[in-house]
Image (tube, helix red, strand yellow):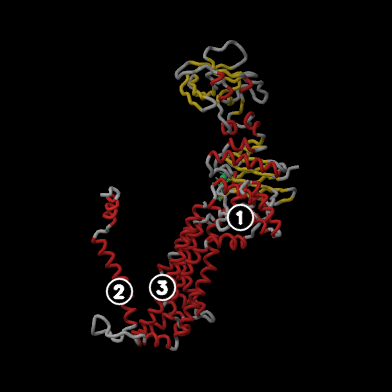
Amino acid sequence: MAYLDLKNVSKSFAGTLAVKDFNLEIEKGTLVAFLGPSGCGKTTTLRMIAGFEQLDSGTILLDNSDISSVPPNRRDIGMVFQSYALFPNLTVRENIAFGLEMKKTPKKDAEKRVNQVLDMVRLQETAKRFPHQLSGGQQQRIALARALAVQPRVLLLDEPLSALDAEVRVVLRGEIRRIQSELAITTVYVTHDQEEALSISDKVVVMNKGIIEQVGAPEEIYRAPQTRFVATFIGTANQFHGKVDGRESVDCGIVRLLTEPLKDFINGQSVVVLVRPENIQVQLEPPGEGRWNSIPGVVETITFHGAVTRLGVNAGGQRVVADITVSNTKPVALNQKIWLQFTPDMCQVMVADE
Amino acid sequence: MDPLSTPKNETKKKLRPASWQVALVAIFLFYMLLPIISTYVFSVATRWDRTILPEGYTLEFYAKAIQASYFTITLRNSFILSISTVLVSLLIIVPTVYWVHTRLGRAKPLLDILMILPFGIPTVVLALALIQVYHFPPLARSPVLLIGAVVVYSMPFMYRPVSNALQALDVQTLTEAGQSLGANIFQVLYRIVIPNIVTGLLSGSLLVFSTVFAEYTLTSLIVGARFKTFPLLLVEFTRINGNIAAAFSVISFTIAWLVSMLILWVGSKGQKATTEGIRAH
Ligand SMILES: Nc1ncnc2c1ncn2[C@@H]1O[C@H](COP(=O)(O)OP(=O)(O)O)[C@@H](O)[C@H]1O
Ligand SMILES: [Mg+2]
């Protein structure tokens, strides 16, 4: 049974649909990431859960009761904002105690709780300072502590790390995940950063233009994208356009690609074959016979990325990128003729949208 | 020679203003200060029509001013008028501007324009229009109507500082943060919003106070002798005795001046708070 359940939720602003028929079940104690490009409706969905936006239609159930028309201050849902939103006139301790005060928690208990959450975010020493005397990363930790102090039923985070620099971002996302699993608090985490979403969450909800493209575990989203949008938005994917030609191949013009058995397609259907750069091997000699795909091409660009080197290859007019690691490939030079090789199971076939 | 002294001298040279600039500032100061200085001097002069400087000095006009039958009551009325205007203005402006900043961002340009209008309407026109529209008791020519009129007239002075203070704050997100922690809208206003815009509220209040304290046209046209304020008494005395009128002016000046000092003081404290507030975002 889902703990937080969004049913057919829709929302539009002045005629433009921001969120369209959104259905999602979130299990208790899990961290779910909303991932998608800017403007795809992540914030709007989160704000509807928080109660800051009214739904046009649909319902939101929390622990089996409809909260769609409960005002935000009675939902018991904590929120962390991109801009931290600490109260500038209150000290760190007063900020964290604010929610407890609103709940009329006895002073002694409130004090104890504030110390607990300060320990949790490891910032006990900042208790007497004002928000502007803290770094961005510290402010966001305090904002997290403030949201958690009242023990909300759900925690919402809207791009909490976007205003921080790269190093702090990586450390802090680990902290958020650690605290979230320690407390086993049901959490929705909004981000447009795929690495962040994939590394932090139990489940990723990929969104585009107000609809859900795919819901799944991070590995699932990466390895088995179900739509072309997901395949191209998460990581990089080469796209070969063509028509289904027989039971296990696609005619792409420059090459006839061998695939896994194509059960859900009919002969002649327009499709796109997606191949990830890291699944392509680069050979310097024409490969021998075998059940694999091989495309000849010329190296046009070589970009060093640290762990991998990305080659941009001109394969009969189509640009294909392939990632090579120093350990498994011989050195390659610009304008060198090479063969791109990959097995049929690395080809993901999708219907081409018109 | 000390090599370090050369650049210093150069800076000094650069900073010295041109003579035309000095002249311009001098003319401006002369223009601004002369009437004030002469009023001060006139209020303590025995006779000042045959010589460049007064023939003698006396405090007798201040004694007479303070003894004038209406002195206390007009001073009291002026304080009543100014303070109630400040309160009404706060009660109207703060929630409205807060609401526009959090819920109705699109209405902000409209409000900005509306808040210039009081400068554009001649006070006499405003007064006569109000008298005609609200000609029925109990409003007709009442101090309540006057307060309504001066609230409108002085509104821009309250609106600007409050709006600027809210602008620097990102109130919408702070409000939502407060709500997600269980606070209702009044708790948000009382505990978060107002403490953070208190300098804006104070400078707005003091500007409105000093404007209304010196207001003449609306008061004289709308209530006249029914609710005589200090500026009315002052103008009355210009017809009786110039020296006493000057003494009234000086008293009025001094109150306004004290209020301005208060504004400057609050302002300098507020500037610190604002920079800190902005740094916090
Ligand atoms: N208050 C609003 N008024 C009008 N349009 C809005 C408002 N909030 C969001 N939108 C629109 O709704 C869409 C989704 O926005 P949002 O949920 O903020 O996207 P995301 O958080 O994924 O970047 C966008 O097209 C945005 O312009
Ligand atoms: Mg957003």
Looking at the rendered structure, the kind of residue marked 2 is Leu
Whether residue A29 is situated above or below residue A261 in the rendered picture: below
Q: Return the x and y of residue B157 as percentages of the image width and height.
A: 45, 67
Secondary structure under tag 3 reads helix
Q: Which residue is mark 2?
A: B34
| Front position in the image: A273 or B177 | B177
Q: How many numbered circles are shown?
A: 3
> Which residue is the extreme one toward the top?
A288
Q: Return the x and y of residue B110 as percentages of the image width and height.
A: 47, 60
The dot on residue B205 is: none
**How far separated are the C-alphas under marks 3 and 2?**
16 Å
At 57% across and 34% down in the image, what residue appears?
A233
At 40% across and 87% down in the image, what residue appears?
B63
Q: Return the x and y of residue A50 as percentages of the image width and height.
A: 64, 50
Q: Return the x and y of residue A27 as percentages of the image width and height.
A: 72, 41
Question: 10 Å neighbourhood of mark 1: few (<14), some, or many (≥20)?
Answer: many
Left or right of residue A17, residue B81 in this image: left
Left or right of residue B250, residue B48 in this image: left
At 32% across and 72% down in the image, what residue appears?
B33
At 56% across and 19% down in the image, what residue appears?
A327
Q: Which residue is mark 1?
A: A95
Question: 10 Å neighbourhood of mark 2: few (<14), some, or many (≥20)?
Answer: few
Looking at the rendered structure, the kind of residue marked 1 is Asn
Label whose residue precedes the other's in the sequence (3 or 2): 2
Is residue A55 something one can see in this rendering?
no
Looking at the rendered structure, the kind of residue marked 3 is Trp
Q: Which residue is mark 3?
A: B257
Q: Quadrant of the N terminus of chain A?
A: top right
**How far separated are the C-alphas under marks 3 and 1?**
39 Å
Chain of the residue where label 1 is placed in the rendered structure: A
